[in-house]
Image (spheres, rainbow, N blue to C red):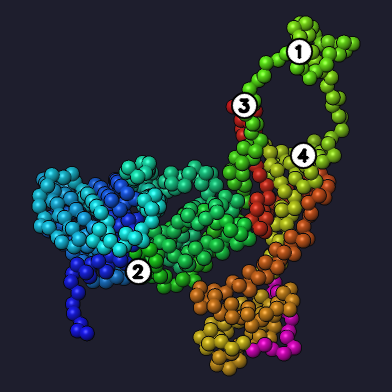
Amino acid sequence: MTIQQLSETLINQIAAGEVIERPASAAKELIENAIDAGASRIEIATAGGGKTLLRVTDNGFGMSPEDLAMAVRRHCTSKISDSLDDVRTLGFRGEALPSIGSVAKLSIQSRTREASEGSLIAVTGGKVEPVRPTPANPGTVVEVRDLFFATPARLKFMKSEKAEAAAITEVVRRMAIAFPSIRFVLSGPDRSTLELAATGDDRLARIAQVLGKDFRDNAIEIDAEREGVRLTGFAGVPTFNRGNSLQQFAFVNGRPVQDKLVWSALRAAYAETIPSGRYPIAVLEIEIDPELVDVNVHPAKSDVRFRDPGLVRGLIIGAIRQALSREGDRAATTGAAGLMRAFRPEQPRPAQPWTPSASPWRPLSDAPVPNGFAEARQAGFDMGIQPSARAEPMPAVVQTETAQETVRHPLGAARAQLHENYIVAQTEDGLVIVDQHAAHERLVFEAMRNALHSRPVPAQSLLIPEIVDLPEDDCDRLVAHAEHFAILGLGIERFGPGAIAVRETPAMLGEMDAAGLVRQLADELAEWDTANGLASRLEYLAATMACHGSVRSGRRMRPEEMNALLRQMEVTPGSGQCNHGRPTYIELKLADIERLFGRS
């Protein structure tokens, strides 16, 4: 078979398969171009989920007729010159416009701010028409119609219009968070209009526009730096979580990314604080020297590679854990909202006409009638026999004597114990309901974890060392971390070029699969350059022991015990949620209580 040169149109269509996977991919590329052009206002219009129409309008610098002709040619860009070591723009490959033009009907209308008129160029299925003058406002309008009409096989793999429209919305949301100083408008017949006003330097205000005002009330600010890498952003308190990861956003030098290293670090940072199957909400911005990150991994530019992934991962975990330790113990405001919904009374039933024969009350002829009720009795209304009020408290409630106590503490002073499991405390501006078992479980676990980290973990020597065969490079990485493992009770040493001898294992783990643990640690070191599997296993055991050693539900506590528990919670990091990630307390402000009774 003879080797032949592919046509330019076919080359572009092949490239389009990598760059333009779906309408959302085209929207992302066009929005990135608008941002790189210095736009302060970007409007996106779609129809048919972006398959029928995708139009992006910006007020950026615009392009001259000469630049317009070059823009639709492959690998033509104004954003880099001869090196990929210093990429400071979102786009740089010069593939988006020619790829779109090869599979769709593309038209670009642009005008620079100095020009008196604009220019227009059209590309249909890879066929480029000459540039011609046209009336235009300063900026650029890129219109894409009938996406993938030139490659109809791709259309079979598209999702429904609703799903494609939702994907474009997600792209706009991520771009809006990354660039709060730009006004975004997303509209079209296939969606309701989304308008995000510019918020300038107030990143949290823009995030609240996208994620809702609840995030503002439950967010913790993050600002940390290590060895020239800076991490900023906001992370939600652990009890403010979701059932999916759609509200996790990561940016590297302003570029939205979907990076497994970042997501892995985020999961590790929230370990022991989020229930299984739930996901934290976070917006993270990593600022790093462009020479230390490779953004050219994939044509879609959504994956990046860090030169020192261990540094970045450690920075994310450490910064978030420090922020959670500082402010993460407060209850999520959504818990109070759910409590209010639970207390909200049902709608009253329509009143039925009253007749004396239908009344369930029986007159009490010899009972004294209070003043003012004689007329009511004559009108046919009688006071029924009322049950006497019990002076003693209900058996399920234990009241406390707290006259001498103050409510100025963050968690207030204990006032009662309900159903022998829930502590009700009064604060200066509301009340707090504490799950005594969950709270004490967290306190015991933190004490055990501090003990684990404050001194070497006791180790048990193996009568016969276990030999684990591994590739030589895995053995090198394990031996390099041998001192760290020894602190955790795992004693290893080199046994020839391709084996590791395990001589000691952590005593608290008892009988265990030492070979399996060593292989797991080797895999972690190969991927992340860190080995947290052993520490995680020890902490898991500590969490299990804490669960069985904490105050059980159903135990009646004395007032001084309840207040001691509250005071200890206030000084213990992570006490806002138990080891399984469930909240340990819910706070209800006085204003919320007043709203329940219609007093505000």
Which region of the structure is painted magenta?
455-467
Residue 141: x %, y % from top left: 22, 49
Q: Look at 43% across and 46% down and name the residue there.
A: 210
Residue marked by disc 2 = 298
Q: Which amino acid lies under the numbered mark 1 shown in the image of this protein?
A: Pro
Residue 363: x %, y % from top left: 83, 13
Q: Which amino acid lies under the numbered mark 2 shown in the image of this protein?
A: His
Question: Looking at the image, do the residues carrying marks 4 and 2 touch, with CB atoms under 8 Å apart?
Answer: no
In the rendered structure, which disc, 3 or 2, sits on the residue that comes first in sequence?
A: 2
Distance from Cα at disc 1 to Cα at disc 2: 82 Å
Distance from Cα at disc 4 to Cα at disc 1: 45 Å
Residue 593 position (above or below residue 211) = above
In the rendered structure, which disc, 4 or 2, sits on the residue that comes first in sequence?
A: 2
In the rendered structure, which disc, 4 or 1, sits on the residue that comes first in sequence?
A: 1
Query: The residue tagged with tag 1: helix, strand or loop?
Result: helix
Residue 448 position (above or below residue 592) = below
